[in-house]
Image (cartoon, rainbow, N blue to C red):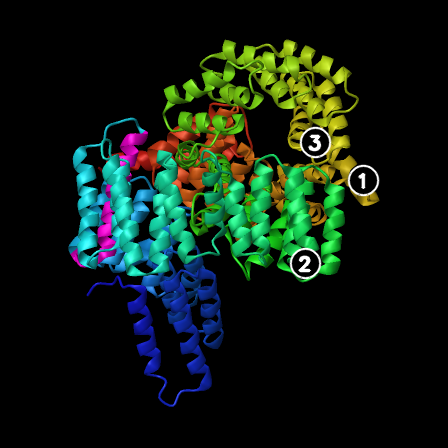
Amino acid sequence: MPRQRSLAVLAALFVATIGGLLIGCTASEKRLQDHTKAGYAFLNAGHVREAVLEFRNALKLRPDDPALYEQLGKALVRAQQPFEGLPYIEQAYLMDPSRTEAALYLARLVAASQPERARDLLNPVLASNPDDDLTQQTLALVLLHEGRQRKALEAARRAVELDPENVDNWIQLGTVYKAKIRRAQDRRQRPASNLFKLAISAYDHVDKLKGGWSRARIEKARVYSIWPGHQKQGQATFIDALSLAQASGSPLEIKLAAWAMDEYGQRRSDAKLRRRALRAILEVDEDNYEAWRALGWLVDRQPEHSGEELYSELLERRPDDARSYLAYAGFLVQKERRDDAEAVIRGALDDGIDGAALQGWLIRARILDGQIGDAVAISNEMINDFPDDRETRIASVWLALAQGRPEEAANRLHRILATEQTSELLRLLALAEYRQGRLAEASRAIERASISVQSISFPILRLRARIAHDSGQFQNTVETIRILIGRGQKLDDGERTLLATALHQTDRRDDSLSIFENMLEQQPPPRVAVLAFVRLEGENDPTRAYQLLQQVLLTSPNDFEIVEALTKMDLAAGRAQLAVQRLNQLAAARLVDPPLLLLRARVLARLGAWDASESDVLRAFEANPKLPGAVDLLFTIYTKNGQLDDVRASFELAEKSGVLHPGARVLLARLYLAEGNLERTREMLEIVVQEVSGFWTAQNDLAYVLAELGVDLDRALQLARKAHAGSGRLPTTADTVGWVHLKAGRYDSALRYFERAIKLSNQEREEVDPAFRYHRGVALLGLGRTTEAIDAFESALSQRSFLGAGDARRQLEAARHQQSESASSS
């Protein structure tokens, strides 16, 4: 029996199920049926927001029924609203983890943004029910996101074998073929022609099973559009899909086909095709402002026409909707007519149009102009005039972001999103999380924003590329930026550098260097490109890298990142004295610059000038007790000089007198840790974490200590992740995240973080801490990979002494003994 059903069939099944209960039904059961029927009707009409409101009302009447959550979530997914369906299906699964279909649907929905979680959801179902077509279909999708296309194809074919009448199985098979085509094209290889034919055949099968379906023809058109020499067939099939959707009379199907055709038109720069698609959307959904805005630009680019013609039409048709004036103002701003845009907003306010939304626009305009004081003044007016309006709450988010309070912005957004979820709100949440360094949370938010928007959103794509790059998702970065390029968007130097870096990290060095060369020919070369080039190619071409850094330094002598990069290269080349001379010149021009003082202290320590190094780091430490790296260097100096006991006694006296600042308390905790006094270490660090928000050094050390004690490991992981994000993804904090995973018995996760710490050290041209290799060895041992563990322990012990070296030796001997016994027994 096919599992795939249309919305109409799902609605009928629901009504029949509930209807059976309505003999002698209560009023609440009748309301449940009414709300659900209305929700399905709105979905069929393409009105998602209204459908969601009806479903929420239905759930209020039966809040403890996981089956209802799952059914409504599936309906939203079937209506191509995965973003809206996700929370319903997730709630069904949380209420009843035995609901295997909910687990599989949830795995499919999170596979792109959370592949590890998708795998965790899938594996138990795969073990218990491998011969179910939905299980194999889901496996195919998860394998695709894991980059295992051959296995994905096997799973997709197996799903079709299990139920050849289920159109979703054929769609998944077509998706795998398309993925194989795109991978070959990304690698500048020519895909085998049979791949295109197989994909087309899969979608033809869907079309036949459905008796003619616009969505199947959309997918066929997409295959033709990437098949060299088949563009005409692609365009004809998109038009055919839209015509079929219009014949069906379904607003939902019409919009899906029209947006797909618009996307194709963008890639082909076919304005006429796009105008036809967007007009088709507005015929069934006049409320669609994405379509109005896109059409406005297309009209504006026509000879002897202006976008103002389209906005005149919009204001005539929807004169009482504030969004009409906001869309027009946005158009004028992009035409660099800010004064005219503000006049439109002011005029609408004078006419009594929704004041909150329009004042929100004025606040954003002031923020973009850097006039934060004026923005605050308008915000205060909004709070007085519209205290409970959503626009007032959203304006407070913009202000929090503008004033450097991303944590507050995120908290406010979570409260708003609890009642209303839009792509723009999710984009703002992703930005707020990103600015806090919470990359996993930012990635989840931007993926949710991406799947909730009806058409291509360039601000979402630009932020998505940055988050993917910083999260190490380099293939995702390449794909996202190529979408921007394909839509004719101009990249700034930062985005071009992201693309070059991502290509380099995905083994496409020649393509990467081509982009770098183009940028580095500029005079002066962009600093962002220079820093990335030095990081990636400094070892291969140190002379060029050094010259580029010097070029940038001439025009930006106070650029600390450039100075730091030059210093690292000098140290690597044995030019420590030259580095000190440069730093002395810079320090003489600045009274107290903590990062610069700390950098000079590190160089002096490399030269063995311990007293001078201590003097610099103490000055830096006094000026900024939270300065990253200061505690580590001081601990190294005091250890080298044999001063640990004296320093501890001095700090303990200051602690009793109540004059020990947080940074010094973290250093005191390190001294206790060196003695093995874990409880006293924890006590010191708990005080700092409680008193000082965002002190990632203290968070990192406390996470390590909790893991060593084997207590509160969930909190330890949370602290370690916060520290890793707050540090800007430093190797030491990556190692701590891995250590917590290790102590919790999660060896796979631990190994990933230990290897990340080593990789980050190499990228920054720093010596790899031998403790990272030791920790990696412990994880490998836990995974039963004894030979690799022995190599890791030997590599760690061949370097300098480190905390845990004694245990590393013991583990090494035990591993050798185990390997010897295994060899003897075999």
Separation of residues labelled 1 and 3 (CA atoms): 14 Å
* Residue 183 is a magenta residue: yes
Residue at 25 percent across and 42 percent down: it is 236
Q: Is residue 154 above or below residue 643?
A: below
What amino acid is found at the position of numbered circle 1 in the picture? Answer: Leu
Dot placed on the residue nearer the N-terminal end, 1 or 3: 3
Q: Answer yes or no: is residue 681 visible.
A: no
What amino acid is found at the position of numbered circle 2 in the picture? Answer: Gly
* Residue 525 is a magenta residue: no
For this orientation, the residue located farthest to the right is 657
Image coordinates of residue 103 in percent, x first then y, are: 35, 59
Q: Viewer-proximal residue, 17 or 90?
A: 17
Separation of residues labelled 3 and 2 (CA atoms): 72 Å
| Residue 72, image quadrant | bottom left
Image coordinates of residue 468 in percent, x first then y, are: 46, 38
Q: What element carries label 2?
A: loop
The residue that mark 1 highlights is: 653
Residue at 46 percent across and 56 percent down: it is 286
Instruction: Please state which of the two labelled residues, at mark 2 or mark 1, is closer to the viewer.
Output: 2
Q: In this view, does 618 lie to the left or right of 545?
A: right
What amino acid is found at the position of numbered circle 3 in the picture? Answer: Leu
Instruction: Report crowding for label 3: few under 14, some 14 to 19, many 20 or more residues within 10 A (C-alpha).
Output: many
Q: Is mark 3 on a helix, strand or loop?
A: helix
Separation of residues labelled 2 and 1 (CA atoms): 68 Å
The circle on residue 644 is 3
Dot placed on the residue nearer the N-terminal end, 3 or 2: 2
Span highlighted in magenta in the image = 162-186
The residue that mark 2 highlights is: 352
The circle on residue 625 is none
Image coordinates of residue 710 in percent, x first then y, are: 53, 50
